[in-house]
């Protein structure tokens, strides 16, 4: 199977915050990979812009180092890298002042696609939007890309939306959630809406429950300052898990195009019931012999910030009434493993005797590692030992089915940046979606704060606090094992 790379039109992409961590680890390597793949032509321009005084040559060295360090391919080829670096230039720019803006406006070209990646903290969004307009760069065909966190609650998200809307139309704003750029997440839509097999069963009549797990084995590391003010609910549930949740639960959109898809996602969030305190567990990891506990890591001995959340959610609509969705995310868990599992109900009547056991189908969408989709089906255990049943996976590991080259998926940032250039907003969050997600999250956080309860401590390397297991056990269900 040969995948086609369709080159994008020539563009100017300005990375504001071009010397930052995100530019280094994700944006520059992603652009390089797309250049190597033949998707970005030699006429395009990539302009790094940040406060640091730097010449283009030094920025090219910075970019080369970033690409060598963070590109997954075995080897970065010097000639390819040199050709890519010719596209790259740098301008010293102050978001809060006038320095550098006239130079920048002279560098970007008229009558071609222009994108401005706001790879800076959200407190600078307003200044950047205002100056892009003042210096004549915010015309109709320009796009801006903004990163998470998009606000820390409904009020701040509304304020950010308001600031951006003063200078840009919604069709120009690309709010990134990199989970939506993952190959498997899009495959989830292909599986649901490209096959007759699943959609008729995709409802509360046939689905017992759905589990979404995003587990990390690492702790907060160097992000402690930010994380301690955010916590797992704001950092993971409100955005990444919510997006997965929407895609699995939404009605079929009329078309695979931005507003059709985003309208359906929004309806899911709006139909979400409030999660009662007894249906939610917060946890915080302890230390062990090798690693410090969370409170030591963030140097806040009284921190009540959660590093783990497990919750049971319900959607009040015809399709899902009665089917619970269990969401779980945490740091310092057993493994780095993310998956969505659709657990179907048992067959209504078993024609086999009790020895055969009870079995049900599970459709598992693995996001990381080993992206793939697996359908658990029940068959007869081979051999002469009578009619005993056994569950076996029908495994659609992409690496096996498509061959190693095809399964070498582009990083989510590669796809998303190319979508910005193509002007396709399908995989980006719309302003009202983000606000609706905060409107659901805010009361949960407010209740925690009012109750003043501490998160449940949990041992690193496990599956979170025991209370999270009870959340499932008391419903007669259990979490799937966290494993890669
Ligand atoms: P960073 O602190 O490493 O870099 C910030 C960049 O902004 C630097 O290039 C700095 O020079 C520039 N900058 C700061 N003030 C400026 C000003 N007044 N004028 C011009 N430039 C200025 O931050 P980062 O980790 O690269 O994150 C950037 C944004 O992306 C943040 O909003 C962050 O929350 C978000 N984000 C980062 C990551 C990540 O992996 N680093 C992941 C998701 C989201």
Image: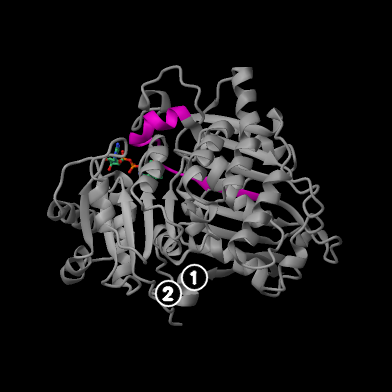
Q: Residues within 10 Å of mark 1 (few under 14, many from 20)?
A: some
Label 1 to label 2, Cα distance in Å? 8 Å
Q: Position of residue 103 (x, y in %)?
A: 22, 50
Could you tell me which secondary element the residue under label 1 belongs to?
helix
Q: Position of residue 228 (x, y in %)?
A: 44, 28
Q: Position of residue 109 (x, y in %)?
A: 30, 62
Residue 164 or residue 255, whichever sits in front: 164
Inspect this view and state whether residue 335 appears: yes
The answer to whether 330 is drawn above or below residue 114 in the figure is above
- Residue drawn at (66%, 50%) of the image: 266
Residue 236 or residue 41, whichever sits in front: 41
Q: Quadrant of residue 205?
A: bottom right
* Quadrant where ligand 1 appears: top left
**Is residue 150 left or right of 452 when viewed as pictured?**
left
Inspect this view and state whether residue 478 appears: no
The reply to whether the magenta stretch includes residue 222 is yes
Could you tell me which secondary element the residue under label 2 belongs to?
loop
Span colored in magenta: 211-229
Question: How many circles with numbers are drawn on the protein?
Answer: 2
**Is residue 224 left or right of 334 when viewed as pictured?**
left
The reply to whether the magenta stretch includes residue 441 is no
Task: Confirm or deny contact between disc 1 and disc 2 (CB under 8 A).
Answer: yes
Residue 351 or residue 303, whichever sits in front: 303
**Is residue 55 left or right of 249 when viewed as pictured?**
left
Residue 406: image tag: 2
- Residue drawn at (67%, 73%) of the image: 195
The answer to whether 252 is drawn above or below residue 26 in the figure is below
Residue 446: image tag: none
Q: Position of residue 397 (x, y in %)?
A: 51, 68
Q: State the residue position of label 1.
A: 398
Q: Residues within 10 Å of mark 2 (few under 14, many from 20)?
A: some
């Amino acid at each position: 199977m040969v995948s086609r790379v369709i080159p994008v039109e020539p563009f100017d992409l300005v990375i504001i915050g071009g010397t930052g961590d995100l530019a280094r680890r994700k944006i520059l390597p992603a652009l390089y990979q797309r250049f190597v793949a033949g998707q970005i032509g030699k006429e395009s321009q990539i302009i790094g812009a940040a406060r640091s005084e730097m010449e283009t040559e030094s920025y090219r060295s910075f970019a080369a180092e970033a690409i060598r360090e963070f590109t997954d391919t075995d080897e970065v080829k010097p000639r390819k890298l040199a050709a890519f670096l010719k596209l790259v230039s740098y301008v010293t720019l102050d978001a809060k002042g006038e320095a550098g803006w006239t130079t920048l406006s002279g560098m970007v070209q008229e009558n071609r696609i222009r994108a401005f990646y706001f790879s800076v903290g959200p407190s600078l969004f307003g200044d950047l939007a205002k100056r892009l307009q003042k210096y004549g760069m915010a015309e109709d065909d320009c796009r801006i890309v903004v990163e998470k966190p998009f606000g820390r609650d409904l009020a701040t998200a509304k304020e950010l939306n308001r600031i951006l809307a003063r200078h840009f139309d919604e069709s120009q704003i690309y709010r990134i959630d990199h989970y939506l750029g993952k190959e498997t997440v899009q495959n989830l839509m292909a599986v649901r809406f490209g096959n007759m097999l699943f959609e008729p069963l995709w409802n509360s009549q046939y689905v017992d429950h759905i589990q979404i797990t995003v587990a990390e084995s690492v702790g907060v590391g160097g992000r402690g300052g930010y994380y301690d003010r955010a916590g797992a609910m704001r950092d993971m549930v409100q955005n990444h898990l919510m997006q997965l949740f929407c895609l699995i639960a939404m009605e079929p959109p009329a078309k695979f195009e931005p507003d059709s898809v985003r309208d359906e996602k929004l309806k899911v969030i709006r139909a979400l019931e409030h999660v009662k305190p007894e249906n939610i567990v917060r946890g915080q990891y302890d230390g062990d012999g090798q690693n410090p506990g969370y409170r030591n890591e963030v140097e806040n001995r009284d921190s009540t910030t959660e590093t783990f959340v497990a919750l049971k959610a319900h959607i009040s609509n015809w399709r899902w009434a009665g089917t619970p969705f269990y969401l779980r995310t945490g740091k310092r868990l057993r493994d780095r493993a993310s998956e969505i599992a659709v657990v179907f109900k048992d067959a209504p009547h078993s024609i086999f005797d009790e020895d055969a056991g009870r079995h049900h189908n599970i459709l598992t969408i693995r996001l990381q590692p080993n992206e793939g989709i697996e359908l658990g089906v029940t068959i007869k255990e081979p051999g002469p030992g009578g009619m005993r049943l056994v569950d076996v996976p029908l495994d659609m590991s992409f690496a096996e089915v498509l061959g190693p080259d095809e399964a070498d998926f582009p990083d989510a940032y590669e796809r998303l940046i190319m979508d910005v250039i193509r002007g396709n907003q399908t995989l980006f969050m719309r302003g009202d979606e983000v606000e609706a997600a905060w409107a659901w999250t805010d009361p949960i956080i407010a209740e925690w704060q009012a109750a003043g309860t501490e998160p449940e401590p949990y041992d690193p390397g496990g599956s979170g606090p025991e209370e999270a297991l009870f959340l499932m056990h008391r419903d007669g269900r259990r979490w799937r094992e966290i494993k890669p």
